[in-house]
Image (tube, grey):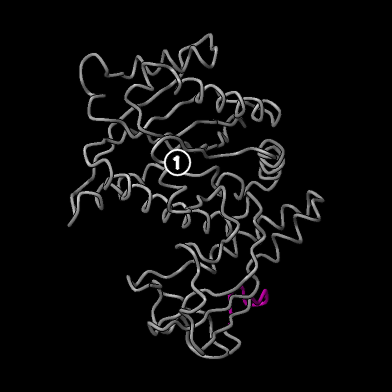
């Protein structure tokens, strides 16, 4: 069922007001404004193809009424540029739905399993070439590390994502991997347990580093248990999984710095895969025919497969107007 109220806006000629049942406004306007900020920088950089694509992202939104009596997004066009704030926001919604379904199903099949959050880092990089090379090396090293007997014997599956942040003081990039490890309860027995020092040494070895990297490992614990234990676990898991980069790293008050970051990230991220899964997580993903944010091309239906039969007559169209900087309802 859609998470939209029956009337996500006022009337014709009024500003779009899309509000969830929780009362939280859907951030169409703020995400569109950020995308236009990115487009402005792309234009100055003479990335004209990207400029046109990003500037036209989600220009017209079409909502349709469902049998439940509410409205949900039915149609629009997203540019799918990796740095586009609008598309990144939609991907984060896909990621949230994906993790909710996967974690609940794994919990159902393996109720005694536990989840561990592992963060793996290396020294900052300073150029697009260095960043690209380091990202590839980290993905390979993580895959090899998970094949080690000490890890594999208690590992039921993992879900790995990459995040990049920008250090504005020295213009460097901090690349790191976030991995959710689903492990059997036997992992916590004395002979099986891997402490932070063990993970650090494994990561150092497989990355072939001549320094001690920053590694963090912690048990994922629900902040509070809800009606079902899996619900509390889902909330905790969703807080740990991030995706790629944040627009606040390249849309700032420093226009020239932003352009450098955009150029570097555009080059370094080209052709890179930023998530992967294994074991029971991958099995559940395949059986439920789920796509994560990396795999999905559908940024409209972010809460599962669309159902054409759920819509009835009743359509709302909202168009972006540059002169007033917001979406205005056309009909």
Q: Is residue 320 above or below residue 129?
A: below
Q: Secondary structure at mark 1?
A: helix
At 43% across and 15% down in the image, what residue appears?
202
Q: Residue 211: percent from the left, percent from the top?
A: 50, 11
Q: Is residue 9 above or below residue 110?
A: below
**Residue 214 placement, left or right of 52:** left
At 34% across and 21% down in the image, what residue appears?
153
Q: Residue 163: percent from the left, percent from the top?
A: 52, 38
Q: Residue 160: percent from the left, percent from the top?
A: 47, 36
Q: Nearer the viewer, residue 191 or 318?
A: 191
Q: Nearer the viewer, residue 128 or 230?
A: 230
Q: Nearer the viewer, residue 186 or 128?
A: 186
Task: Locate residue 71: give its quadrant.
Answer: bottom left
At 63% across and 59% down in the image, what residue appears?
35
Looking at the rendering, in which quadrant would you find the N terminus?
bottom left
Q: Residue 209: percent from the left, percent from the top?
A: 53, 12
Q: Say whether residue 59 is magenta.
A: no
Magenta stretch, residue numbers: 320-328
Which residue appears farthest toward the top when viewing the image?
Answer: 210
At 38% across and 18% down in the image, what residue appears?
199
Residue at the disc numbered 1? 282
């Amino acid at each position: 069922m859609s998470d939209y109220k029956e009337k996500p806006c006022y009337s014709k000629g009024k500003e779009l007001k899309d509000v969830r049942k929780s009362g939280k406004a859907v951030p169409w306007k703020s995400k569109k404004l950020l995308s236009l900020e990115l487009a402005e920088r792309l234009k100055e950089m003479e990335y004209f193809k990207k400029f046109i694509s990003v500037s036209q992202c989600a220009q017209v939104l079409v909502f349709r009424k469902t049998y439940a009596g509410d409205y949900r997004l039915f149609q629009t066009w997203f540019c799918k540029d990796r740095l586009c704030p609008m598309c990144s926001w939609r991907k984060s919604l896909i990621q949230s739905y994906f993790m909710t379904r996967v974690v609940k199903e794994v919990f159902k099949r393996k109720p005694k399993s536990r989840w561990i959050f592992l963060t793996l880092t290396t020294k900052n990089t300073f150029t697009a070439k260095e960043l690209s090379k380091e990202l590839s090396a980290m993905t390979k090293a993580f895959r090899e590390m998970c094949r080690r007997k000490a890890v594999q014997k208690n590992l039921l599956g993992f879900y790995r994502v990459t995040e990049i942040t920008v250090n504005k003081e020295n213009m460097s990039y901090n690349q790191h991997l976030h991995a959710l490890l689903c492990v059997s309860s036997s992992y916590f027995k004395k002979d099986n347990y891997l402490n932070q020092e063990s993970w650090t040494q494994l990561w150092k070895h497989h990355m072939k580093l001549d320094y001690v990297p920053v590694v963090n490992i912690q048990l994922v614990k629900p902040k509070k248990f809800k009606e079902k234990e899996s619900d509390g676990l889902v909330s905790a898991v969703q807080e740990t999984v991030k995706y790629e980069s944040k627009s606040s790293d390249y849309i700032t008050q420093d226009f020239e710095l932003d352009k450098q970051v955009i150029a570097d990230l555009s080059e370094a991220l080209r052709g890179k895969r930023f998530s992967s899964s294994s074991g029971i997580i991958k099995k559940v993903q395949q059986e439920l025919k789920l796509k994560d944010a990396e795999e999905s091309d559908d940024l409209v239906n972010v809460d599962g497969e669309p159902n054409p039969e759920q819509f009835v007559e009743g359509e709302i169209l909202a168009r972006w107007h540059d002169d007033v900087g917001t979406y205005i309802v056309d009909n």
